Image (spheres, rainbow, N blue to C red):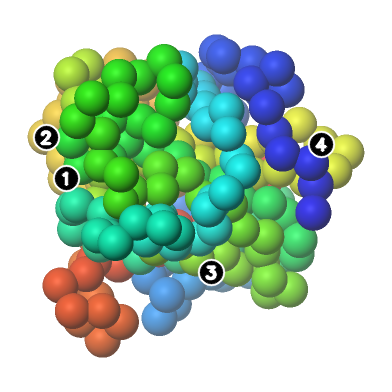
Amino acid sequence: MPPPITPSLLGRRLVVSGLAAATAGASLPTAVGLTQTTSLLPTPRQTTGPFYPVDWSGDADADLVRVAGEAARAQGVVTHLRGRVLDARGEPVSGAVVEIWQCDAFGHYRHPRDRAEGRDPGFQGRGRVATWPDGSYAFRTIRPVPYPGRTPHIHVAVVMPGRAPLVTQFYLAGEPLNERDGLFNALRDLRQREAVLLRLEPAERIETGALLAGRDIVLG
């Protein structure tokens, strides 16, 4: 597995860039993946934010809803996030490390710079997995919530040896706060916005009361 990415590697403020995004990248696990094309447009880059995890020790697996040693599970609506990591030709990328991090149901990050008072001890706050041979990844987390100044979002990083990490953010389709969010609106191309939107659907067949979202990630 590639070494963990660190704030020094990513920088605190990556410039929002990327020419465009994969318009066909949004799909639920029943149809996760992109149709074959000669060249896919890359997932746009966004900032890491001020709360990239500084501690990946302990429980940092794909299930953010359960924390080892905590009796209660995370507050919030359980959400299954699934997709694939693809290259620009639409080929699956095996062995890439996908990381996500987000605030808990009360708007607090698992980070020393965010206040610990009121933080949900049952929420892992960050997770890391390696993609399977078919490029797929899967996380069990919670539906992202807003906090002052930001629309609901999930931070995502994809790390591979020999190339700069791809850092982006996923947003909820149809969320009214998107239109007032500076980072979301920095994506002026509608194709870029589409490439980072999550469409939530009921996931009763997976877990009672849970939601499901599919999002492929295309490396430029």
| Residue located beneath label 4 in the image | 163
Report the residue that reaches farthest toward the left: 176
Residue 182 visible in this rendered orientation of the protein = yes
Residue 174 bears which disc, if any?
A: 1
| Residue located beneath label 3 in the image | 33
Q: Residue 218, relative to residue 35: is it above or below?
A: above
Query: Alpha carbon of mark 3 to alpha carbon of mark 2: how far?
Result: 27 Å
Query: Alpha carbon of mark 4 to alpha carbon of mark 2: how far?
Result: 35 Å
In the image, what residue type sits under mark 1?
Gly
In the image, what residue type sits under mark 2?
Pro
Q: Residue 168, relative to residue 8: is it above or below?
A: below
**Is residue 40 rendered to the left or right of residue 199?**
right
| Badge 2 density bin: few <14, some 14–19, many ≥20, Cα 10 Å | few
Question: Circle 1 sits in a helix, a strand or a loop, which is it?
Answer: loop
Badge 3 or badge 2: first in the primary sequence:
3
Identify the image quadrant of residue 117. Answer: top left
In the image, what residue type sits under mark 3?
Gly
| Badge 1 density bin: few <14, some 14–19, many ≥20, Cα 10 Å | few
Badge 4 or badge 2: first in the primary sequence:
4
Q: What residue sits 73% from the left and 22% below the top?
A: 9
Give the mark count: 4
Q: Residue 6, relative to residue 127: is it above or below?
A: above
How far from the left and from the top, in percent, is residue 146?
19, 32
Q: What residue sits 64% from the left and 36% below the top?
A: 166
| Residue located beneath label 2 in the image | 176
Identify the image quadrant of residue 181. Answer: top left
Query: Alpha carbon of mark 4 to alpha carbon of mark 1: how far?
Result: 33 Å
Question: Circle 2 sits in a helix, a strand or a loop, which is it?
Answer: helix
How far from the left and from the top, in percent, is residue 15?
56, 15
